[in-house]
Amino acid sequence: MSNGLEDVIAAQTVLSDVDGARGTLIVRGVSLDDLLARRFEDVLELLWEGFLPVENLAASLGAARIRVFEQIRSDPALLELSPTEAMRLMLARLPDGDSAETALALVAGPAVFTPALLRLKAGHQPLAPDAALPHATDILRMCTGKVHSQVQAAALDRYLVTVADHGLNASTFAARVVASTGAGLTSSALAALSALKGPLHGGAPGPVLDMLDAVGTPTNAGVWVEEALARGERLMGFGHRIYRVRDPRADALKGAVRMLGAARAINPVRLAVAEATEAAALEALRRKKPDRPLDTNVEFYTALLLEALGFPRMAFTCVFAMGRMGGWMAHAREQVLTGRLIRPKSVYVGPVPKMVA
Ligand code: ACO
């Protein structure tokens, strides 16, 4: 038995391949490096080919943003919840189904609901989508009403592309399990989002910022890291179940963070603290865990990127879902079309009924 299902192959997929030894990610035959030259809408089209046919995907996604915006109801109870929990509730109101239209609504959901929730929490009215804008540009505009710079829109677009799909991670597996029962895309999306929420998966970037706040200054990074490890804590944004070398997505996002730095669109002190903390963490982890390669994962630079774009840390998981929803939808359809009901076995280790003499 493998407690975390390590090395267990539970699906055959044409969607993406994560090579943990080489540190590479391929999405439908395209390497991450080449994927970064494409827009999120084009990556969605690539992922959905043969599973969710959509004509003119960019325009259809824009129309879906308008459709889901019309579902927003003012509900004070929503504002009591964390953005991820509130968004889960809003997505749950979308009808279930297996069509490309359902999938488009689910991709549009986090993109529209997250800015709306953040505005409602701040006492402002939600801003309606502009179907003609690129997806990433429109998300930023719906947050503040302002037109963001090209470099900011490009940074969010790169983030969405980078996280769109990543093999059989916990949330994607959850999506496939639910899809395998025939429950529908909305049900799969809700299961996946619930899995993504945990700090060992998509909930890590918020705690990365908490860590950087605690480090405070670049010169404190070494001491802070040593003390955290001595307390038995895990350093957020480091380590990965599959990668035994650096997560290639960390470099993709570090590139975007550097672009923001060059455009003076990121706090330079924050950047300096982050770079010092990364260096101290890598040095300490190599020294303390020589047998277990632990390197920077996607969440470390995600935290810096999303903070620089103005997203509060409580909404980071929602932004992750904006990108990953595309992958979840493709996997759910692939499971329905090429897989079968997922139903593994367990080993019973509990008490057995007493034998009657
Ligand atoms: N900091 C310190 N020690 C670590 C870290 C870390 N970030 N990650 C792993 N270790 C240590 C563990 O304590 C363990 O040590 P031990 O053998 O002495 O007990 C050893 O490395 C192996 O750890 P596992 O838990 O077996 O590794 P696993 O593959 O299960 O964990 C995980 C992967 C959950 C991502 C882990 O590295 C972690 O908790 N990282 C911090 C949280 C994080 O960044 N999550 C985001 C992941 S990326 C994503 O999901 C999108």
Image (cartoon, rainbow, N blue to C red):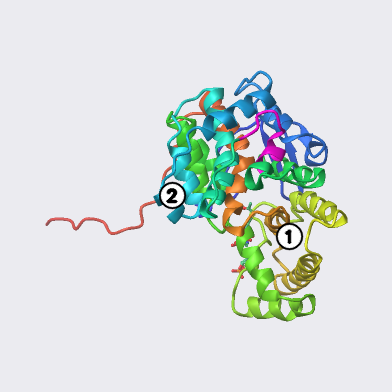
Question: Which residue is depicted at the point 41% across and 50% down?
Answer: 76
- Residue 114 relative to residue 273: left or right: left
Q: What kind of residue is marked 2? A: Leu
Span of residues in magenta: 129-139
Where residue 267 sits in the image (x, y, percent)?
Answer: 78, 63
* Mark linked to residue 296: 1
Q: Residue 157: say if magenta.
A: no
**Residue lying at the far top of the rendered structure:** 55
Where residue 135 sits in the image (x, y, percent)?
Answer: 68, 35
Q: What kind of residue is marked 1? A: Thr
Quick check: 144 above or below 335?
A: below
- Residue 213 relative to residue 93: left or right: right
> Which quarter of the image is occupied by the C terminus?
bottom left
In terms of image quarters, where does ligand 1 lie? bottom right
Q: Residues within 10 Å of mark 1 (few under 14, many from 20)?
A: many
* Mark linked to residue 78: 2
Residue nearest the viewer, comparing 246 with 352: 246
Quick check: 148 above or below 132?
A: below
Quick check: 72 above or below 222?
A: above
Where residue 256 sits in the image (x, y, percent)?
Answer: 80, 50
Is residue 249 something one can see in this rendering? yes
- Residue 305 relative to residue 199: left or right: right
Is ligand 1 within 8 Å of the beta carbon of the residue shown at mark 2? no
Residue nearest the viewer, comparing 343 with 134: 134
Residue nearest the viewer, comparing 348 with 259: 259
Residue nearest the viewer, comparing 339 with 195: 195
Q: Residue 137: say if magenta.
A: yes
Distance of label 2 from label 1 (alpha carbons): 35 Å
